[in-house]
Amino acid sequence: MTSGVYAIPPFRTTTDEIEDWIDKLKNFILAMHGSECATDRKLAILKTVIGDEASLAIRNFQAGEKDTFEHLVTKLIAYYKPALQTSTYRHEFYNQYQEEQEPVEDFINRLLDLASKCGFRILCKAAEGANLAVYHDLTNEFVRDRLMVGLSNESTRARLMREKDITRP
């Protein structure tokens, strides 16, 4: 019987999906250490094999987000997965135009639906202790801007530009 050193390649943000990589890691841990592998050992293995790129991101996570294997896995998925989804939704949002014969109210609702997935909230103050994080929601401003660009009728655009709140029909 030959013995060899088995390894899992580090996570690469440009080519790997984080959930797929974590599945490979879990299978690697199971194969190498069995189902009774201690969670602190799993955490150490994850931090060791994930690679330099993700290690830099992990350093910036809050202590409670990286104190256990499960917490770190959850945070890594949340950290890497939405970036792609947010970019995809924003691309779709910024390419919206009013369809022929589409009522303005329907166009606004379509924009609002997409905007809700775009992450147009900006963190103003991080959570500290019992104090919640403070965000500034720019969704309505972005919807208004996209609406002005995407409207098909110039007179409707001119009328709406004079109104204060156009994002709620």
Image (cartoon, rainbow, N blue to C red):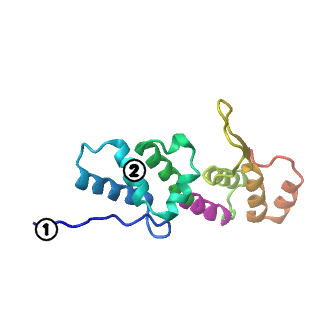
Q: Which residue is mark 1?
A: 2
Is residue 48 visible from the viewing direction of this image?
Answer: yes
Residue 156 occupies which quadrant of the picture? bottom right
Segment tinted magenta in the rendering: 84-95
Which element carries disc 1, helix, strand or loop?
loop
Q: Residue 35's quadrant in the figure?
A: top left
What residue sits 50% from the left and 60% below the top?
54
- Which quadrant of the figure contains the C terminus? top right
Q: Residue at x 40, y 54 (%)?
A: 46
Residue 24, percent across and down?
33, 59
What amino acid is found at the position of numbered circle 1 in the picture?
Answer: Thr
For the residue pair 35 and 108, the one nearer the viewer reads as: 35
Q: Earlier in the sequence, mark 1 or mark 2?
A: 1
Q: Which residue is mark 2?
A: 44
Determine whether, in the image, residue 140 is placed left or right of residue 99.
right
Q: Quadrant of residue 101?
A: bottom right
Q: Which mark is residue 73?
A: none
Image coordinates of residue 144 in percent, x first then y, are 77, 55
Q: CA distance from mark 1 to mark 2?
A: 26 Å
